[in-house]
Amino acid sequence: MDMLRKTRAEIYLDHIEHNLNAMRQTMDKHVKVAAVVKANAYGHDIVKVTDLLLQNNVDYIAVATLQEAVQLRKKFAQAPLLVMGYTPDDQLPFAVDLSITQTIFSLQQGELMAQRAKTTAKTAKVHVKLDTGFNRLGYQDHQLALEEITALADLEGLEVEGIFSHLALNSVESDEKQFQQLTDLVAKLANRGVEIPNKHICDSIGAVAYPHYHMDMVRLGALLYGYCSRPTSFELKPAMTLRTEVSMVKTIDSGQGVSYSHLYTASAPTSIATLPIGYADGPPRNSWREGQVLVKGQRAKYAGLPCMDQCMLDVTGLDVAVGDEVILFGRKGDQELPLNDLSKWCGTNKNELLTRVSPRVPRVYYRNGTIVDVVDYLES
């Protein structure tokens, strides 16, 4: 018996491969790719996507947290893993033990990792984060960074494999200033004999907008999954479609309300379709104000507030029945409701909507139009 929910995320693996390879065609051959799979690979499943990307020979798998890296190390014993975010001092030894490359931004962090490396006969690899204006993580004092990175390079058991920053993407001028700050520090380190092999500043948007900033490596995240807010020279193919099916259709009279607080009230006899998907599955509660979905290829508006597990549509004038397919975002055949539309209706960005798709939504994987795998997090 097929227990898989009709509400599901359909993920096209060949689209992820296409996006990666199309971007590679725009890059110099020496530039490495750090494929970003944080936040469950932007909702696409961290293990499944990592496996695909390793098969496509990316140079690094990048995550936000040590916990994400540990999850991947259990599945991929030899994969090059980079933690881009903060790891507390008491957890740094685990990165060394599991051969996980760690982002640091202090001499103390490096000393802790070097000490662990010496006692375990391992090499602790690190990428040093420099704050050039994003004002999140990293050395803000670049003179201090110069002194401490020089000291880090001399620590036994520690390999300073990378140095990087993150563009704020505020303007061309401010991005250039950030890039210049990173390259200035790299030059000063080189004058001291400290050569760092992996220098990087570009995320997906930066990699598309500024090919001359590619340095040694680029960090590709949203672009892999089919999205970039800057124009690309190639077609991006969104990898995920979120879909469900109609669970009930009814007619309500004029003056009747729908859902909590009756924020939607019918002004005439109205056909209402109920869907077995709610904000606990991913679509934001505020999508009802302007949001639409595709029902059998026809756009329909929400009727009232989405509930935790269900939502309602006004399908008046449409030929809709129980079991009809509904697309919340994405493409199915020649039917498409772009995620960009939903992000505008909800007042957020595409990445948030992708990562909101919850674990109770099964992921169904396609290659060349054929289902090749299913990930159901609630499967017992």
Image (spheres, rainbow, N blue to C red):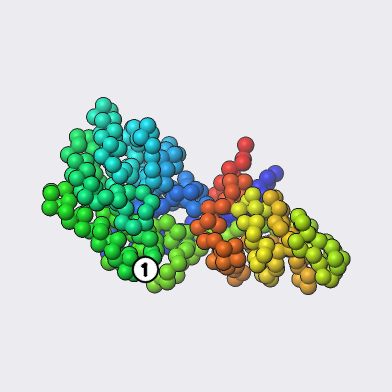
Give 124 or 255, whichever is nearer the viewer. Answer: 255
The residue shown at (25%, 57%) is 182
Determine crowd level at label 1: few under 14, some 14-19, many 20+ residues with C-alpha closer than 10 A.
few
The residue shown at (37%, 32%) is 90
**Residue 44 x/y as whole percent:** 51, 52
Q: Name the residue under label 1.
A: 171
Task: Tell me: 331 left or right of 267.
Answer: left
Task: Tell me: 351 left or right of 296.
Answer: left
Examine the rendered structure and indicate whether residue 95 appears above or below residue 145.
above
| Quarter containing the N terminus | top right
**Residue 39 x/y as whole percent:** 48, 49
**Residue 255 x/y as whole percent:** 85, 66
**Residue 166 x/y as whole percent:** 35, 56
The residue shown at (31%, 56%) is 132
Give 240 or 258, whichever is nearer the viewer. Answer: 258
- The answer to whether any part of residue 326 appears in the image is yes
Res. 250 image quadrant? bottom right
